[in-house]
Image (tube, rainbow, N blue to C red):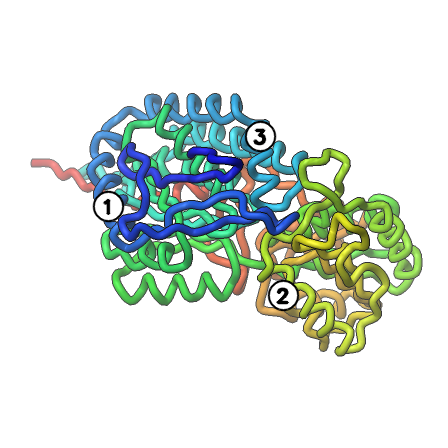
């Protein structure tokens, strides 16, 4: 990566070399807070993906031949190298994504933690012996796929790229990573760090737009694909992959996640959690955001003012300013989509009680800014209650009976997370059994715990990440039967 008069120019990493696209085309990236051009990266083509595949395939036999302890040592050194550049990476992420600097520091730190977790879990990639007959030895081996592909979203571009590559390569795979086109710059720095630590070709990074991702998905010899992003894109990836080969595709997709607050909950903690769980600090751009706040009718008029009071104290501002509570949205597309949903909610009859527009002031005249927005009196027949906005928009609904709120929570085709607030253990267990979501907090929200599998039900995805389940998903099981001669 080079800097020329404040313009950052990234390169792709293919086979240990930093290269431009064979097409000669480039893709601009802008600062979402100011709409100023800050850099450019190569527009990767199918030819570049093929070159990355060839490099990854050439590197894979030697990589998988290493002892697990050696691969783990490489990952731990990668974690150390990333940790040494935390502040620089966080600053670059802030200007490229719009997320605040404090959140970006935490993202880099979390990536390092997950890289080290993957290194430690490598020894758990075990087969098993099976007492099928006494006349022979029957056992299984876990083997890597070979070359795998990973497509990264815009909300945690460095964090997801760095941590997810660890889970893919520790079993012995090599990888091709395609970063998001709107926030690709930190992936180019990741390439520099990787190239200093790992053998050439183990990790390859190809920048570009949707066509670049499609070339990875459609490559007939890349049999393992992982994606984080929108449900519609995930379904398109499944279709495209199936048209060329039988592939293992895992998807962590969107959510319209409920937070259910019961009358017996600690209302102060629950009200604070409603703001935290909505991820306003990420501009609502988190698939796990609890964007449907379901308040029991007995506490509705108590909790809603708490939520509005906390939101009123939030401070939108420069993502590089540690005092800023939230930054701009990642792109004009996300900004415009969010404003459209705000208008749709008004048309459907929801009551706007906070936000709903661009913040006031000269600092916000440019950039993709949307105030933290809250709609009250939301009902399940409104689009704002059923469709993922992926912006700072919270829908507040009222419920009376437990059966009613469970039906409300399950009434959509997404099921990523849910948050339940109650001190009634029997009720909490009922919610956890009956709510259709892959990751459920009781009296908590937002926190991802180490080695706890994360993923969704229904159209929120398939497969699990963030722990041993993720590592196992990058292996195939081979059965071996040794019979007496």
What quarter of the picture does the N terminus occupy?
Answer: top left
Left or right: where 302 falls relative to 365: right
Label 3 close to label 2 by CB (< 8 Å): no
Q: Residues within 10 Å of mark 3 (few under 14, many from 20)?
A: some
Between the residue at mark 3 and the residue at mark 1, the CA separation in whole angstroms equals 32 Å
Label 3 close to label 1 by CB (< 8 Å): no
Disc 1 is placed on an element classified as helix
Does residue 418 appear anywhere in the picture? no
Labelled disc at residue 109: 3
Q: Position of residue 48 (x, y in %)?
A: 28, 49
Question: Looking at the image, is 395 positioned above or below residue 65?
Answer: below
Residue 407, by quadrant, is bottom right
Q: Which residue is mark 2?
A: 337
Q: Position of residue 249 (x, y in %)?
A: 38, 55
Residue 414, by quadrant, is bottom right
Q: Nearer the viewer, residue 130 or 109?
A: 109
């Amino acid at each position: 990566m080079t800097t020329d008069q404040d313009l950052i120019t990234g390169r792709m990493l293919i086979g240990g070399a930093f290269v431009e696209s064979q097409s000669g085309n480039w893709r601009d990236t802008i600062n979402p807070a100011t709409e100023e051009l800050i850099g450019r990266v190569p527009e990767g083509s199918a030819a570049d993906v093929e070159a990355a595949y060839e490099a990854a395939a050439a590197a894979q036999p030697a990589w998988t031949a290493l002892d697990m302890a050696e691969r783990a040592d490489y990952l731990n050194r990668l974690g150390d190298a990333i940790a040494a550049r935390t502040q620089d990476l966080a600053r670059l992420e802030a200007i490229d994504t719009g997320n605040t600097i404090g959140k970006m520091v935490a993202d880099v730190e979390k990536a390092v933690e997950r890289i080290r977790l993957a290194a430690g879990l490598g020894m758990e990639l075990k087969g098993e012996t099976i007492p099928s007959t006494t006349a022979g030895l029957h056992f299984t081996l876990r083997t890597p796929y070979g070359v795998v592909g990973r497509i990264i979203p815009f909300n945690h571009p460095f964090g997801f790229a760095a941590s997810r590559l660890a889970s893919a390569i520790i079993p012995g795979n090599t990888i091709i990573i395609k970063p998001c086109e709107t926030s690709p710059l930190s992936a180019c720095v990741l390439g520099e760090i990787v190239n200093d630590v790992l053998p050439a070709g183990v990790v390859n990074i190809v920048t570009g737009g949707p066509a670049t991702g499609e070339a990875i998905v459609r490559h007939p010899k890349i049999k393992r694909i992982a994606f984080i992003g929108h449900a519609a894109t995930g379904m398109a990836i499944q279709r495209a992959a199936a048209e060329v080969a039988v592939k293992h595709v895992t998807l962590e997709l969107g959510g319209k996640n409920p937070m259910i607050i019961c009358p017996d909950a600690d209302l102060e903690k629950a009200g604070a959690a409603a703001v935290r769980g909505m991820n306003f600090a990420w501009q609502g751009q988190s698939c796990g955001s609890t964007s449907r706040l379901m308040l029991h009718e007995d506490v509705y008029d108590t909790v809603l003012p708490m939520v509005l009071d906390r939101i009123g104290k939030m401070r939108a501002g420069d993502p590089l300013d540690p005092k800023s509570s939230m930054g701009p949205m990642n792109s004009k597309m996300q900004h415009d989509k969010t404003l459209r949903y705000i208008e749709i909610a008004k048309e459907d009859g929801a009551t706007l009680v906070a936000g709903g527009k661009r913040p006031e002031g000269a600092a916000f005249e440019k950039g993709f800014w949307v105030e933290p927005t809250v709609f009250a009196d939301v009902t399940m027949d409104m689009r704002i209650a059923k469709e993922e906005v992926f912006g700072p928009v919270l829908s507040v609904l009222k419920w009376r009976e437990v059966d009613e709120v469970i039906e409300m929570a399950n009434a959509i085709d997404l099921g990523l997370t849910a948050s339940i607030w109650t001190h009634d253990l029997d009720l909490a267990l009922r919610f956890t059994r009956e709510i259709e979501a892959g990751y459920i907090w009781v009296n908590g929200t937002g926190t991802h715990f180490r080695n706890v599998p994360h993923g969704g039900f229904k159209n929120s995805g398939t497969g699990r990440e963030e722990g041993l389940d993720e590592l196992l998903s990058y292996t195939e099981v081979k059965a071996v039967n040794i019979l007496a001669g």
